[in-house]
Image (cartoon, rainbow, N blue to C red):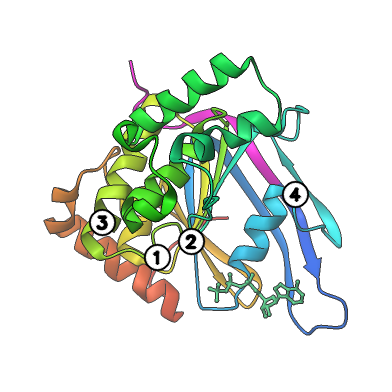
Amino acid sequence: MPQASPDQSTVAIQCQQAAVQFGSAVFQLGPIDLDIQAGEIVSLIGPSGCGKTTLLRAIAGLQPLSSGSIQTHASDTNDCGEVGFVFQQPALLPWADTLSNVQLPLDLISRGTKKTRQAAAIDALRSVQLEHASKHSPGELSGGMQMRASVARALVTEPKLLLLDEPFAALDDMLRQDLGQLLISLWQQRQFTAVMVTHNIAESIMLSHRIAIMRGGKLERVIPNPLAWPRDESIRRTAPFGEFYGLISDALRGVESVEGQV
Ligand SMILES: Nc1ncnc2c1ncn2[C@@H]1O[C@H](COP(=O)(O)OP(=O)(O)OP(=O)(O)O)[C@@H](O)[C@H]1O
């Protein structure tokens, strides 16, 4: 049975006084304290340049900290397949077909046999409804199909942790909503922990259990999402959605009308 909500008993990501300083640059991230539970999806939202991507990269271990620490349940193992990434651009290899692109992370970590890797890639393609395009090159796919392939590639190793950096920002609104629903249905199957950078308030509300508001390198507040989970698109037309949208907008504008917790 799919789980309906995150596992509140296991901390999957623990940021303790995590800070990043870039050389002589003025910007400093943190120090940030944040615990994310296993199976939780947390959105990072805030003005351009406030440090969302830097925090995401730090969680991924791609950005060294100048002080503090970030522990993830992925960093407890040495398995490179424990973290999946989805970026704004699908970044598929143009010379390889869709199946090979999706299979690539398994090939890179040499997991299983060639046959099991291919079977896993086909499964991942099926989960994003792209099995029929396995032999197509990325140039033959629409933008939405490319992004679905990118999601399949991120999930093919069955990572416990999925990191998404404005994954659907380049897509039109309808496609963006469809891919959001796809992410929710994949979560229902796999209950991964996810951190997603977005500029889109509605998307952060639809897809996350908590919304972390950042400003000037600081984590200002983390707001629990009161809407029932999992959500479908009809929730956008409800009063609670509208109210929560207003509350997040206020928080982003720095209006002190909301109780948050870090
Ligand atoms: N490698 C780097 N060296 C120096 N400064 C950096 C580096 N990477 C990011 N910065 C600076 O850190 C700050 C935060 O950048 P970051 O990309 O994390 O912001 P963001 O909130 O994700 O922005 P956006 O919403 O525009 O993508 C910016 O001032 C940026 O110029």
**Circle 3/circle 1 CB separation < 8 Å:** no
Q: In terms of sequence position, does the residue under pointer 3 or pointer 1 come before the other?
A: 1
According to the image, label 4 marks what residue? 61
Residue 193 is one of the magenta-drawn residues: no
Tell whether 123 sits left or right of 61: left
**Circle 3/circle 2 CB separation < 8 Å:** no
Ligand 1 quadrant in view: bottom right
According to the image, label 2 marks what residue? 88
Q: How crowded is mark 1: few (under 14 residues within 10 Å), some or many (20 or more)?
A: some
Residue type at the position of mark 2: Gln
Residue 169 is marked as 1
Measure the alpha-carbon separation of dots 3 and 1. 10 Å
- Secondary element type, mark 4: loop
Residue type at the position of mark 3: Leu
Which residues, given as a range, are shown in magenta? 1-14
Residue type at the position of mark 1: Ala
Measure the alpha-carbon separation of dots 3 and 2. 14 Å
Tell whether 45 sits left or right of 157: left
According to the image, label 3 marks what residue? 175
